[in-house]
Amino acid sequence: MSSLIGTYECKVDAKGRLMLPAALKKQLAPALQNGFVLKRAVFQPCLELYPMAEWEALMQKVNKLNRFKKKNNDFIRLFTAGVKIVEVDATGRLLIPKDLVVFADISKEIVMSSAINIVEIWDKDKYEQAIDDATGDFADLAEEVMGQDDDDHGIS
């Protein structure tokens, strides 16, 4: 799958359903028939929507962990806690299960933000706060992560 692009503001109805934005739905079109995996994020109070092919590729890596090591079993259990298979219905809606709505503290207004090969789903207020909190540190973070000029991993 190619990289997803865009950040979209949406509304969630009382049942936890959201209408996929048309531009995002178009990008996800190749994955619509195979469904998605929705899970809790590891580092942030948001959800991660994985196209099934991306999830399966990730699970191939996780499946290589030695399960006779307690920390690996603990990681697998926590990483997959609350994981749900979800599908986009005929009208383009996606149902967020109640336990995941509670985890991400999702209210009516949400943000769907592309994160290369997955989509993060945030409560709008929490998303804006996370962006505001990270803004001051972003230059240092960008330099540390992407500014490696001594090898071929930097982007400039």
Image: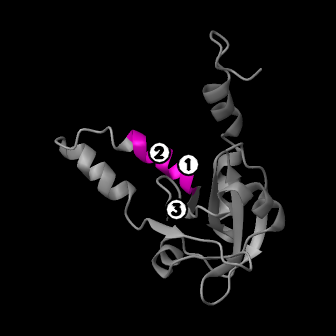
Query: Quadrant of the rendered structure where residue 107 is?
Result: bottom right
For the point 49% across and 44% down, the residue is 57
Residue pointed to by mark 3: 37
Residue pointed to by mark 1: 54
Residue 19 horizontal/vertical position (percent): 73, 76
Few, some or many residues within 10 Å of mark 2 (<14, 14–19, 20+): few
Q: How is the image coloured?
A: one colour
Span shown in magenta: 51-61
- Secondary structure of the residue carrying numbered label 2: helix
Screen quadrant of the C terminus:
top right
Q: Residue furthest right?
A: 23
Query: Quadrant of the rendered structure where residue 139 is?
Result: top right
Q: Is residue 55 magenta?
A: yes
- Secondary structure of the residue carrying numbered label 3: strand
For the point 64% across and 47% down, the residue is 117
Q: Is residue 100 left or right of residue 151?
A: left
Query: Mark 1: which amino acid?
Result: Glu
Tell me the tag on residue 58: 2
The mark that comes first in sequence, 3 or 1, is 3
Q: Is residue 34 magenta?
A: no
